[in-house]
Amino acid sequence: MTFSGVLAITLVLAVTVALAVPLGRYMYQVFDGEQVPFDRVFRPFERVLYCVTGIRPEVEMDWKAYLRALMLSNAAMGVFAYVILRIQAWLPLNPAHIGPMPPYLAFNTAVSFLTNTNWQNYAGEQSLSYLSQMIAITFLQFTSAATGIAACIAFLRGMRSRQANALGNFWVDLTRALLRVLLPLAFVWSIALMALGVPETLGGYVTVHVLGGGTQIIPRGPVATLEAIKQLGTNGGGFFNANSAHPFEDPNVWTCMLEIWAMSLIPTAFVFTAARFLNAPKLGWVLCAFLTALVFLGALVVYHAEAAGNPLLAKLGIHGPNMEGKEVRFGIPLTSTFVAVTTAYTTGAVNAMHDSLMPLGGMVPLVLMMLNCVFGGDGAGMLNILMFFIITVFICGLMVGRTPEFFGKKIESREVKLATAAMLVHPFVILIPTAIAMATPAGRSSIANPSLHGFSEVLYAFTSAAANNGSAFAGLNGNTPFYNLMLGLVMLFGRYISIIAMIAIAGSLAAKNIVPVSEGTLRADTFSFGAVFVAIVLIVGALTFFPYVALGPIGESLQLALRS
Amino acid sequence: MINLLRAIRFTFASAFVLGLLYPLFGCLIGWLLFPFSSQGSLMKAGREIVGSYLIAAPYKGPEWFAPRPSAVNYNGDGSGGSNDAPTSPALLQEVQANMRDVLKANPSLSAQNISPSMVESSASGLDPDIEFQDALDQIPRIAKATGMSEAWLRHLVESHVIEPRLGLYGVPMVNVNELNHALAQARKGNGS
Amino acid sequence: MEKRRSWSKAIAGRAVVDALVKFDPRVLVRNPVMFVVEIGAVITLLLTIQPSLFGIQSTGYQAGARFYNGVVTLILLITIWFGNFAEALAEGRGKAQAETLRRTKAELMAYVKRDDQWEKIPASALRRGDIVRVQAGELIPADGEVLEGIGSVDESAITGESAPVIRGAGGDFSSVTAGTKLLSDELIVRVTANPGETFLDRMIHLVEGAKRQKTPNEIALTVLLAGLTLIFLIVIVCLPPVAQALGVRVDITSLVALFVCLIPTTIGALLSAIGIAGMDRLIRFNIIAKSGRAVEAAGDIDTLILDKTGTITIGNRLAYAFLPVQGHDERELAAVASLCSLFDETPEGRSVVELAKQMGIEYRREDYARARNVEFSAETRMSGLDLPDGTRIRKGAADAMKRYVEAQNGRVPSDLDEKVENAREGGTPLVVVENDEVYGVIYLKDIVKPGIRERFAELRKMGIRTIMCTGDNALTAATIAREAGVDDFVAEAKPEDKIRLIHREQEAGRLVAMSGDGTNDAPALAQADVGLAMQSGTQAAKEAANMVDLDSDPTKLLEVVAIGKQLLITRGAITTFSIANDVAKYFAIIPALFSAFIPELGALNIMHLESPRSAILSALIFNAVIIPILIPLAMRGVKYQPQSAMRLLMRNLSIYGVGGVIAPFVGIKIIDLALTAAHFIGGGFSS
């Protein structure tokens, strides 16, 4: 670890915050509906879309209607993507003549992109046609992010309304998230990526005779446009198997930084958007400071572990950082930042193979996904933050002797019930499938590495699926009926149960009056409260997963330390 | 029912905009503005495409700058890493094998000064870059195999070095494709 | 009072037995956390009987497995018993009290009017609308309203207050309560409550906790605790397959032990005790709450609506200054005023004499035995003294006195109005006249109760706004408001104004508390989120309110708020403590579970506990004994000081959160040392 390395990490994260603040304001204006910037540019496009799809934007929805629309739209999109994957062989834009995707894998893939997870049990360059990359993958990468954003906006709107049932209109929120937030950003990013070397073409794979003799296939495709929304939408599913480690997806340090900023941008902006909705401007800075600090800390641990290198290889005389599964061009600090950011923001893109990280380096992404609310994904992460906020507010409210208030809304048993349910989902869908996988030959046979690390692969897979992250300890062979099915289900539960619970909470909070602030109110938008929030998130996370992390990366790390 | 219909209509409309218009428009812009990079940064020798600058090709033989080890044998449409755990015996075996190869090819090196990146396989299996020092370490071998002077090779490497950006990001490195392309041009020029 | 506070050994003794009865799973299931502990105990009990029951029995643990399983079972049972004991103890005080009350009730006899005859029947046969006769020395058989007569009543059975109170027909003092004793005279009472609905019945229910329902907040907390329990259940249940795949054979008994250590048993055991003790604390403050919900609501109060008279000021105005008009000096005025009030028995009158006395002016009643005292009447609005020599001294309201002087063709001094106005500020002017000559003005002032200002300041720190309601004019109200330090006031308030005020505050999202006693307060008491009625008040007020103060002290609202907050804080503190404890327990048990097979994990044994078994037993014993250690805290409640929410949070978090993390590290280590010293458990960590 060097000073310049730490500085490198710090600067990248600082730029994220600098970009996020104005975007946070913009997103607030977009969804608040008053004084929307560039309204004249976007409105005509929206009108056309509303007209074509029969959306009546003026209709206000209660929580049930909002949820119904959300679930139906997602169901339709999921089925659509599944069908495309199954019949891609017979559709146009398939220069590499790729066959249809088998059913289990297609189910897993459709669910994976629908839930913003982007777990990939396939290698993009071998399994998807250009059309599938565009109309199944890129498309879902937009809509899954927009769905998360809409769900969170609905919650925030519920927080602001006084004794009313309306959470807004799902279709309008979805459209605005797509057209006014994601599409313009994706456009800017994809052009920047192209300029920096990322391919964007419909031209087919090229087979070449290389200089050293022999042939090589150079795969290509519309990579830059996918790459942009892959990161901006905290999706993470790459065009190629190696994901952002692939030189076409991420050719240099500039693109690497652009991708880090892209995936951290919207979730960071969201804390500022939420703060405006909750009428607690300071909250944005409190959350941003604490959560960025956690990301920074995570990056530092990875940096420390990776820069120190592998002591077992040092015995052979190989000294220096752990370069197994890493690319030279990024350098260790930027690689470490990517590892922490991609899991904190539950994107799941990788520019190094997480399976080959040092045990403690690999523990960081695992833990960040277990916490699932260190910013988290677009919208969904903010929902998780709010869910943990409700739990924190409840416990702290007791400690100051008042029925807990959450930004003016009283938290009563209904909200606690739903928040507890949402909180339960995460450990449930991680631990139970992990136990099943470890207990069955079908689960164990996919493991690549021996002993404790092999367990880490399974634990990582289900944690990644539950957190809708998508990164992997990729040694695990996920393309089996068992994992395709199990991971698919875990992704669905991990995604929708908490969305359902949180929108139900929004419905019940919306109907409540807003209690005015007084001296007796526990202000949640203070750094002290932020510290308590972080402490509770860490303690609950630690208590839930400690035995498993002890059997995985901690045990492996201790073994490594004692063996060398 | 109306909701379901609306969901289906929205799916088709948005898939058209986001899944077709957006990437196709991207391709158009790439073709117009970035004709080189948008097509995959293809590397040509004369009129023939000999690979991509961004994709490490398998340079076998002592006369080429060797890229980093690849777990997928430089398979262009099958990128990936070894995914070996740091504690895995497979990793130890692989690294030991790579060390043997490197030491055999470059007798001037000793085990103590091999950098990890030359014996540990890359993440993509297609990493086109090697550390500056690794390129320098290979010069004696290449000089011997091609008859080019070490000074010229050193100059070649130095002229292609990519320094860390802003002094912070990355390590001093060179792109093997660029080096080998220049090497090939030079040899063609020499008529060898 | 004393008898309530006493904590007899009998109560504790009975709690010991009651705690055993509560082992009944049908009872225990109401408390999900303790219920799963009981299930755990059953599992370890089976393992004690047949150690290889589940097949998974590691070789390392083979030796003495049965003994170890037995010890774990015993500790689990003791853990449950501790929890039951806490609850039984909290209930015990109420039960003892309820028994006394019930005995009183059983003995009640009534003389009821049937066909114009007084017939003696048991009080339990009385119905609403019956007319009963109570004579001196008898117990009043039912709640009711006095129709005829007036008498002094000893209400100590209910209020604990031994000084008798006057009850009589009509007005605000007509309600009588069953179980109280008539000391003098005879009352004819109309019964207003059917058997089972009387105040006595309600009190019995309340103190017994028989009808105790979980409050909303308690339900929410129970849900959260159940959620945590479920998480830990999953954590534990998923461990064996994972461990087995890694070649680690885990011991079922140890897993049960880990599970019980992790789930929030401390708060689970004490939760209902905290609630009962909170109600009990109110009762000891002589306040009867009709539901636990009301007590919790009290902790949330944002706005306190208080009557000026009797709550903020002591009921009466007192002479504060003599303001002479032109041509007279202060001593002259004081002398006339003092003489005027010589036989005036009202507090105002006494205060005039008192104030003059401080100036050295004093008259003796004997010297004026032949003078005639003129009482105050609503008609004349003045009072005074007619001396034998024909001098007539009067004091009274300004306008009445002006008319009086003018009627005698006397002169109204030009500066009188000014003096009167001066005295109006926060008080009442009384003009003093001798014959037709105006001497000046007595400035009668409302006296703010001592200490009330500080209490309002405390409330403000807690975030509670105080609003004073008074029938006075705005000027007077403003002065008192300033002096007492209330945040707002409503002057010239009519009863409807109070309701309007409550509505306004509630619409803004605030919770409102108020106290009252009169019949016309009843709607407002019902509307308020917390309504505290005075025991001395009317039946209607008591019906409408959700709390009744037996001491009839309106300032008790402040205590009610504090008790409500304290109740929640105690719950929160013990919850936090309970969860924070888990950190240390993990560090004790995880290495103990796995280190036999993954020796490297022994590095996590940062407490350097002696052996896996001693580590697990130490954690488990700590987990059990922390319950009785915290019983006094649960009963007494966490100390509450009014301060801003954030400071309160930080204070409690540092004590119960940080303390909760540290305490078990120390405690478990000590228990481990003790176990090792006693050679209770042998065998070291394998690493």
Image (cartoon, coloured by chain):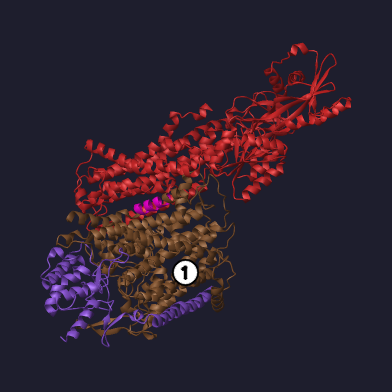
Magenta stretch holds residue A533: yes
How many numbered circles are shown? Answer: 1
Place residue A84 in its image quadrant. Answer: bottom left
Which chain shows up in brown?
A
Q: Is residue C285 above or below residue C47?
A: above
Q: Is residue A422 above or below residue C76?
A: below
Asked if residue C322 shows in the view, the reply is yes
Q: Residue furthest bottom?
A: B47
Which chain shows up in red?
C
Shade representing chain B: purple
Q: Residue furthest top?
A: C367
Callout 1: 10 Å neighbours few (<14), some, many (20+)? many
Q: Is residue A55 above or below residue C474?
A: below
Asked if residue A83 shows in the view, the reply is no
Badge 1 amino acid: Ala
Q: Position of residue A125 (x, y in %)?
A: 31, 78
On the image, numbered disc 1 is attached to which residue? A146
Which residue is located at x 78 percent, y 13 percent?
C368
User: Horizontal placement of C301 versus A307: left or right?
Assistant: right
Place residue B68 in its image quadrant. Answer: bottom left
Q: Position of residue B187 (x, y in %)?
A: 18, 83
Residue interval drawn in magenta: A532-543
- Dot 1 falls on a residue whose secondary structure is helix
Magenta stretch holds residue A206: no
Which residue is located at x 48 percent, y 28 percent?
C6
Q: Position of residue C223 (x, y in %)?
A: 45, 51
Place residue C288 in its image quadrant. Answer: top right
User: Horizontal placement of A93 versus A316: left or right?
Assistant: right
